[in-house]
Amino acid sequence: MNLNDLLDPLILSRWQFGLTTIYHFLFVPLTIGMATTVAIFQTAWVRTGKAKYLQLTRFFGKIFLINFAMGVVTGIVQEFQFGMNWSDYSRFVGDVFGAPLALEGLLAFFLEATFIGLWIFGWDKLPKKLHLVTIWATAVGTILSAYFIIAANAFMQNPVGYEINAAKGRAELTDIWALLTNKVALAAFPHTIFACFMVAAGLIIATAAWHLYRNQHLETMRPAMKFGLWMMVIAGALTVLSGDQLGLAMVETQPMKMAAAEALYHTSTGADASFSIFTLGTPDGVHELFSIRIPYLLSFLSTHTFDGTVEGINDLQAQYVQLYGPGDYSPVIWVTYWAFRWMIGLGMLHVLIALVGLWITRKGRQPRWRWLWRVAVWAFPLSLGAMIMGWVFTEMGRQPWIVFSLLKTQDAVSPGITGLDVLISLVAFTLIYGALAVVEFKLIKKAIQKGPDDAPEPDPESGELRHEATVY
Amino acid sequence: MDLTILWFCIVGFMFVGYFVLDGFDFGVGMSLPFLGRDDTDRRVLINTIGPVWDLNETWVIVAGASLFAAFPEWYATLFSGFYLPLLLILLALILRGVSFEYRHQRSESAWKKRFDRMIVIGSAVPAFLWGVAFANIVRGVPLDAGHNYTGTFFDLLNPYALLGGLTTLLLFFTHGVVFVSLKTEGDIRERARRLATRAGVLTVVVAAAFLLWTTLAHGTVASALLSAAAAVALIGAVLANTRGREGLSFGLMAATIALAVLSLFFALFPDVMPASNDPANSLTIENASSSAYTLQIMSWVALVFLPLILAYQGFTYWIFRKRVSRAQIPVEGAH
């Protein structure tokens, strides 16, 4: 590869978008999951008046806020990047894709950003119940924003509600309702939100396990552990169910992605439509050397029947050449194949941790083998890993398209930017994001290890629990 | 009314909102080395904007998204054309945002100093570069027939644009310092008032030069009147400040920024990005806009939700209306 290939703005922009998006999405699931969790703790406090719920609200609220700032500042990059690096994409889809983004800003971001400020600094300024409303408003804002961004993303997976204006060379919105009720969005939204709750549950389990292993803060960390374990199991089950629905929508709208998820080259039916847990292949991925397979499973995942037919990559490739002209229409198979497996595998692993946790703590028991708590700490990184793998799968599985069937990624990059421009930005983002990741990790770790503050004293006059004002 | 004109106004309103609101955040950030004599001072300064900087910054996200939805060609040309300045703005906003949250997490003074520096840089860079960017939009940039920017990064650093950058830098600085005098008590309030007078006089000179240049080279009757009004408001703000009328001074600073931004938008209209090489390549509100259907949907959403947004943001400002004093800053270690 020579220098010109290395400084190809397309390749560099793809790396930059991938890296900055994955990085952004390390913070987003925690923001979404923790906003609701903290709101639940605070509701428990307002309703019961028990000190432990106030302690949990303040403690997880602090971790939530350290994370929140990173979600906000890395999010601006996302909003700008479509125009900066993908201007031909923006021109082509802006009429359609811009709308959900603007809706996200007007309906969700303002809500989130305004009420988070009221929540952080309003502890001593707002009545207790109104203060509770502010964290719920923040939580609603985070979830709404997820809906709009997933509706926008769903258009890229399964374009609906548009027509092509040939004179202007762009897609134009014809039906906003169709755009917002895209079947891919309706399945991907619950799948993503429940996965976000799994990440939040992972953080709570890991935090509680760290303290329980050291036998400290038991009065808060035991209820936190119980909460986290149940949240993980429930959110895990719902993630699986919605993932199944998403799978069906994917087979219908992007059969190539399902074929790529299984590296299924030949159209297969029934027992032959098997799901491989693990495969070793030749380096080009086309020939299989060794594989552990579950017969019928791929047929079931794709069609909900055991004798269904799943189209293979080769047949789909031939169809797409007919439809869209010559070209390679399959994504990078080893990426989709392994990302799909890692998503499912890591996901199942941390649900398993939660199930074991529920079993060993049943009826208030404490585990005999304390090292189990050390294993439970892994629930957090595993849940983040599964989340990232899911996005890598869904975005890489769409390639070579940026908008499925309408626009290819290679035709979407900004014509005016040079490879050097993108190299500069890629290096700058990598350095700054890297440095901030270290600081962020240390601060969250420190906040977790410090543990909740002591139970607050009741005010001698009113009998209410005292809570300090927050000051930067 | 033609919806493209309505959306030109809404986008203008969004940028007015962004510069008026985040403008004083930038000013407060830049004032740290001038007004923050010790750590408690600096914490007082940061806490004046603590509850609101995030919602203020959100205005730029929504402005960007509105631009994307209503004028995709404008969004695409502007953001890809001004790639490196926008990169610098993004990096600065990242550093500023995390610094607000990180600086109080540890009590060592080296830790705090590092984030104080990042707040200053993270405020000054966007305050300067937004002016450079908008001045270049008004001045016109070379565009090809596909509306792609054909100049270089250094073409953007022409004298007119640099003067525009200096103008926004000084406007936001004065705006922020006036805000500090409005939101603090005691010694720091007094020092902020004196600094605002000195900075204000310099701002009047620079802003008048920039607005005059704009009027002579790119102006229309409407933009000239707005520029004149902005100049009057700015002089009024400085005078109000010297008489200790902090609220009035802040209101006039906000009006100055709003009028100046509107003056630039009026100078542009009906172009949104004039091409300096060939007027045929210019982006206008017509050839840059979305379809009528998209604009219609977005208009309903904006007309319903913008009043609601302004109401709850106003509520936030009302809740945090009290002045911040040194006495409210807890002793280190108590946090």
Image: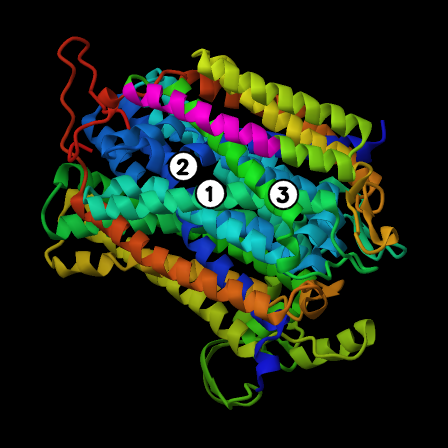
Q: Where is residue A111 in the image (x, y as percent from the top left)?
A: 51, 31
Return the disc, 2 or 1, that comes first in the chain's sequence: 2
Dominant secondary structure of the magenta stretch?
helix
Q: Which chain carries label 2?
A: B
Q: Calculate the distance from the C-alpha at mark 3 to the C-alpha at mark 2.
A: 23 Å
The residue carrying mark 2 is B29
Q: Calculate the distance from the C-alpha at mark 2 to the C-alpha at mark 1.
A: 8 Å
A87 or B215: nearer the eye?
Answer: B215
Return the disc, 3 or 2, that comes first in the chain's sequence: 2
Question: Which quadrant of the figure has residue A364?
Answer: top left
Residue at left offset 55%, top offset 62%: A17
Q: Does the magenta stretch include residue B311?
A: no
Q: Calculate the distance from the C-alpha at mark 3 to the C-alpha at mark 1.
A: 20 Å
Which amino acid, mark 2?
Gly
Q: Is residue B98 left or right of residue B172?
A: left
Q: Mark 1 lies on which chain?
A: B
Q: Where is residue A29 in the image (x, y as percent from the top left)?
A: 43, 49
Which amino acid, mark 3?
Gly
A302 or B193: nearer the eye?
Answer: B193
On the question of residue B229 being in view, the answer is yes
Q: Residues within 10 Å of mark 1 (few under 14, many from 20)?
A: many
Q: Is residue A468 left or right of residue A281?
A: left
Q: Is residue B191 magenta?
A: yes
Asked if A257 appears above or below B303 in the picture, the reply is below
Q: Is mark 2 on a helix, strand or loop?
A: helix
Q: What element carries label 3?
A: helix
The residue carrying mark 1 is B124
Residue at left offset 71%, top offset 75%: A316
Question: Magenta span covers which residues?
Answer: B187-207
Q: Is the Cβ of the residue at disc 2 closer than 8 Å to that at disc 1?
A: yes
Q: Where is residue A208 in the image (x, y as percent from the top left)?
A: 21, 47
Which amino acid, mark 1?
Ala
